[in-house]
Image (cartoon, grey):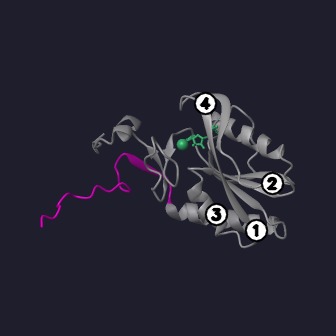
Amino acid sequence: MATSTAQIQSEFSNPNLEVLISTEEIKNRIQALGSQIAREYAGRNPLLIGVLKGACFFLSDLLRAIDIPLGIEFMAISSYGSSTRTSGEVRILKDLDVAIENRHIIVVEDIVDTGLTLSYLLANLKSRGAASVKLVALLDKFERREREVEIDYLGFQIPDHFVVGYGLDFAERYRNLPFIAVLKNPDAAQLGLPISTTE
Ligand code: IMP
Ligand code: MG
């Protein structure tokens, strides 16, 4: 039987990626956030709501760092418009399966960019009669903000670069990276072409 000798092309050491936040830094920050949330929500049985798909990775690590009883739910949301300019209109693709009246809600998001998605989502959840609604975000691209969004618990502030990894994608690629990286050449990234390491 013929065996394939095709070389495995490593995604994690792809030369088109420049590591911005390492696996270790993410892990340490999440431990600190988890401890803080556990202290502040003790006895309140918070409901963590993850925004699909990007926040799943952050949510799954974060909740294991919060050592108190809690629940999790997911929502999927889409913004109208192209990926670079959104109109500010937001659509719920997958809603919650439970009522959230009188619950203490913690929305878990991967990144706050323009803030359009989160300002809509937070207002929407508050209108459903939650006891409280707070936000934990792994990344804050503060220079691009168009709507004010209060981030109650933040992982890292980052400069205005397009980042991938640890749940964040570029055309659905790179979510599996165990670190956060800047894409050096987005055109090549989308086509999946080999990148010259000499540039
Ligand atoms: P906002 O409504 O502009 O704040 O958009 C937030 C959403 O845009 C995030 O949940 C991400 O899905 C996506 N996004 C914004 N910036 C980046 C980035 O640098 N890399 C990957 N996705 C991003
Ligand atoms: Mg995305």
Inter-mark Cα distance, 3 to 1: 11 Å
At 74% across and 41% down in the image, what residue appears? 149
| Residue receiving disc 4 | 80
Q: Which residues are magenta?
A: 1-22
In magenta stretch: residue 16: yes
Q: Which mark sits nearer the N-terminus, 4 or 1?
A: 1
Q: Which residue is mark 1?
A: 38
As helix, strand or loop, the secondary structure at mark 1 comes to: helix
Q: Position of residue 141 (x, y in %)?
A: 62, 41
Pair 1/2: label in front? 2
Question: Mark 2 or mark 3, which is nearer the start of the sequence?
Answer: 3
Q: Residues within 10 Å of mark 2 (few under 14, many from 20)?
A: some
Q: Nearer the viewer, mark 3 or mark 2?
A: 2
Dot 2 or dot 4: first in sequence order is 4
Q: Which residue is mark 3?
A: 62
The crowding category of the residue bearing disc 4, from other C-alpha atoms within 10 Å (few below 14, some 14 to 19, many at least 20), is few
What type of secondary structure mainly makes up the magenta span? loop
- x and y percentages locating residue 133 in the rendered image: 80, 51
